[in-house]
Amino acid sequence: MLKRGPILLAGILAGILPCGVATSQTSTALNNQVQLGDVFSQQTLNVETVTDSTTANTTATANVYAASTDGGDLDVRSNQTSSGDVVADTVLNVAANSGAATNLTTTASGNLGDASIYGGTLTGVFTQATTASTLYAHSHIEAPNAQTGDVATSAQAVGNNQNLGVSVAAAGVRVNQANAGTAYSDGGGVYGLVTGTAEMTAGAMGNNVSLSGDGGSGVRMIADQQNTAANTHASHFTAFGQVQDAKTTAVAAGNNLNVVNEGYLLDATVNQGNQAYVRAQAESSAANFGAGAAVASGVGNSAVMGDIGGEVIIDNTQFNEGGGIEAVAAWTGGEGYDGLASATATGNSALGYSCSDCSGRLTVANSQTNTVDVGATATATMTTGRSVSGVANAVGNTATYYVSRPGE
């Protein structure tokens, strides 16, 4: 077990301080947050006719924390614990017209952390824990006799979410995430007429880590993600009388990590373990359409790690067990042009890359174990149209590591 104190962080940072990074001024931040009760937000919009836009933003979060510096060093110790249910609910009822643009955003999160630095050194230990609870994001549009120009909806449920930003800087960080809460996003919508684009998405994740680095930064990270919840589930169901371009998406992941740096070093040690039953389900139908798609993606553990400009060192371990992975996509079209149903289910997925023209080098140690069933089902039905496509991919373990030129 690696220690979390100064010895660990000194070792992480050794040898990665880029030239020009200030180290003379250090800010410290200690954060401890515990939420024991339930957190919920709900709103209902009843619309007869509007000409411009209809917008709703519904957010429920147990704990939120942010820390940043510009031109100095930052040392952070953050501990967040959520024990209650977190619920966000958005309902839109439309009688005639919801305007040229309709936008709904619904988010339910257990713990949310954000740390960023510019022109300095970031050190930190970020610990997030969500105990047995429910994280539920619900979004629904009821407009069977109404219309809109463009519609975009998003329903997201996340147990633990940590974001990190590093610009012209160095970072040595450790992220510990443990989720035992059921993350469930449920999206739906019915429209009589959408004259433009309908983009409707549901997403559910037990744990998520995102890091973005640029400006010649150097990053060393240790991330441990454990999802022990019973279920991680994303579903979205839509129906249209007439739509020009419709895409209904459901994405579910037990653990997700996305680390991308534009600098001279990315050193990532990642350990992911998922025990939840992960299910993504997207279903859509339209009587008349230009293009329509239902896309479902479910994964137990997913890690993306890349550096454009320097060396990449990856030590990746993924273990998926428990209830299995399932992705279900269904598209039904009456009369139109192009229809698609796409379902992708994966036990463990890893992607790592570096840039050859930037003197990049890639060093990888990869271990993936999947012990459960993985299934993908796609159904595409069309009465009259130009083309119909179905894609169903199920993979136990997949890993891709490469070095390439920019733009390839």
Image (spheres, rainbow, N blue to C red):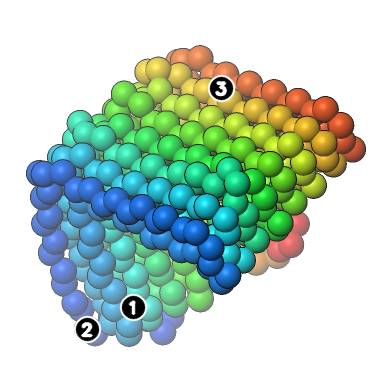
Circle nearer the viewer, 3 or 2: 3
Q: Amino acid at mark 2?
A: Gln
Residue 243 is situated, as x and y percent measured from the top left of the image, at 71, 48
Q: Amino acid at mark 3?
A: Gly
Q: Residue at x 44, y 77 (%)?
A: 168
> What's the distance in space between the residues labelled 1 and 3, CA to CA?
41 Å
Q: Where 286 sits versus 23, above or below?
A: above
Specify whether 316 is left or right of 393.
left
Res 52 → quadrant: bottom right
Q: Residues within 10 Å of mark 1 (few under 14, many from 20)?
A: many
Q: Residue at x 19, y 48 (%)?
A: 39
Q: Amino acid at mark 1?
A: Gly
Any part of residue 327 in sight: yes
Q: Where 129 sits versus 169, above or below?
A: above
Pointer 3 or 2: first along the chain: 2
Pointer 1 or 3: first along the chain: 1
Quarter of the rendering occupied by the N terminus: top left
Residue occupied by mark 3? 396
Q: Residues within 10 Å of mark 2 (few under 14, many from 20)?
A: few
Q: Secondary structure at mark 3?
A: strand
Q: Secondary structure at mark 2?
A: loop
Q: Are marks 3 and 2 in contact (CB under 8 Å)?
A: no
Q: Residue at x 64, y 46 (%)?
A: 192
Q: Are marks 1 and 2 in contact (CB under 8 Å)?
A: yes
Q: Secondary structure at mark 1?
A: loop
Residue occupied by mark 1? 120
Residue occupied by mark 2? 25
Quarter of the rendering occupied by the C terminus: bottom right
Residue 167 is situated, as x and y percent measured from the top left of the image, at 44, 74
> What's the distance in space between the residues labelled 3 and 2, CA to CA?
48 Å
Res 320 → quadrant: top left
